[in-house]
Image (spheres, rainbow, N blue to C red):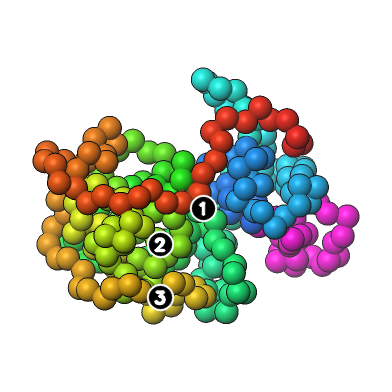
Amino acid sequence: MSQRSYGDGCGTALALDVVGERWALHVVRELVFGPKRFRDLRNALPNASQNVLSQRLRELEDEGVVRRVELGPPVSARAYELTDSGRALEPVLIELARWGAGRATLDGAEMSTDAFMLLLKVFYRPPAPETPALAVRLVVGVDAFEVTATPSGVTVVRGGQSEVHATVRADVRTLRALIFTGLTVAAAADAGDVQLSGDADAAQRFFRLFDKERRPGDVRSSRADAAAGTGRPGPMVHPSRAGRSQQPDRGGGLRGRAVGGGGDPVDSGAGHP
């Protein structure tokens, strides 16, 4: 716990004694989908100084919200992950994001990849009960997430290896535009902002499953305004075949340049607590 306390017996105040310091909930948000190295957290939270981030991690570790783990093989690296207590904060983060979504954002404010993935849970609009599941892999830089949309909800898994209907590679700004503006997957691919493999219609339907009327802050204006595709999802595509073509058994896929952030997949663990 921080040396500062509200000195209040209310559960809300007690919770804020633990996660109310600046950047504390950001750290929790960045760990919702799995462990990260200190370097990864620094990249995701560039406005937090190294000293402040180290202090928040120590405090959260002392309070049992996060813990240190060793990643590997093949390369051993020290990382942080949420404990059960920390994971229990996910619905709190979702509701906070929903509450704050209508507020204006600062000029130039960016969103981390994990923040965007959590946003999918905030704005998901379940389809009709008879709608079949739709699975899409979203790739941003070196990060990949499997997102499965069903009538009962949406799940997000980092680095999954299941078959999906489509794989979309883009940066966060483009992914936000695909949801919250009229930008279509085809137009983004033609412009070189997206690399797409698998079922293009399924990818377009996926981005229409979110409530664009309650978009968070300002996002890039659309380049195109076209109707989303209809029908059932096409064939599933295994990750080992992703990127070969638009359809899993034939060539002729939509191609564009790869965009998005990067990151060094290897971290010795030096320079952080």
Q: How far apart are the alpha carbons under marks 3 and 2?
A: 10 Å
Q: Disc 3 vs disc 1: which is toward the camera?
A: 3
- Where residue 174 is drawn, which disc sits there? 2
Q: Where is 41 relative to 15, above or below? A: above
- Residue type, label 1: Asp
The residue under label 3 is 221
Q: Mark 1 points at which residue?
A: 114
The amino acid type found where label 2 is placed reads Thr
**Which residue occupies 35% across, 66% down?**
178
| Residue at the image position 65 percent from the left and 57 percent from the top | 25
Q: Give the range drawn in magenta.
A: 1-25
Q: Which of 26 and 254 is in front in this view?
A: 254
Specify the quadrant of the image occupied by residue 211.
bottom left
Residue 108, image x, y percentages: 59, 69
Residue 2 magenta = yes
Q: Which label's residue is closer to the chain start, 3 or 1?
A: 1
Looking at the rendered image, the disc whose residue lies closer to the viewer, 1 or 2, is 2
Secondary structure of the residue carrying numbered label 2? helix
x, y percent for residue 70: 62, 27
Q: Nearer the viewer, residue 216 or 3?
A: 216
For label 2, count other residues whose C-alpha is less than 10 Å away and answer few (under 14), some (14-19) or many (20+): many
**Alpha carbon of mark 3 to alpha carbon of mark 1: how far?**
22 Å
Q: Quadrant location of the C terminus?
A: top right
Q: Can residue 222 be seen in this view?
A: yes
Q: Is residue 102 above or below residue 163?
A: below
Decide: marks 3, 1 in contact (CB < 8 A)?
no
Residue positioned most to the top = 74
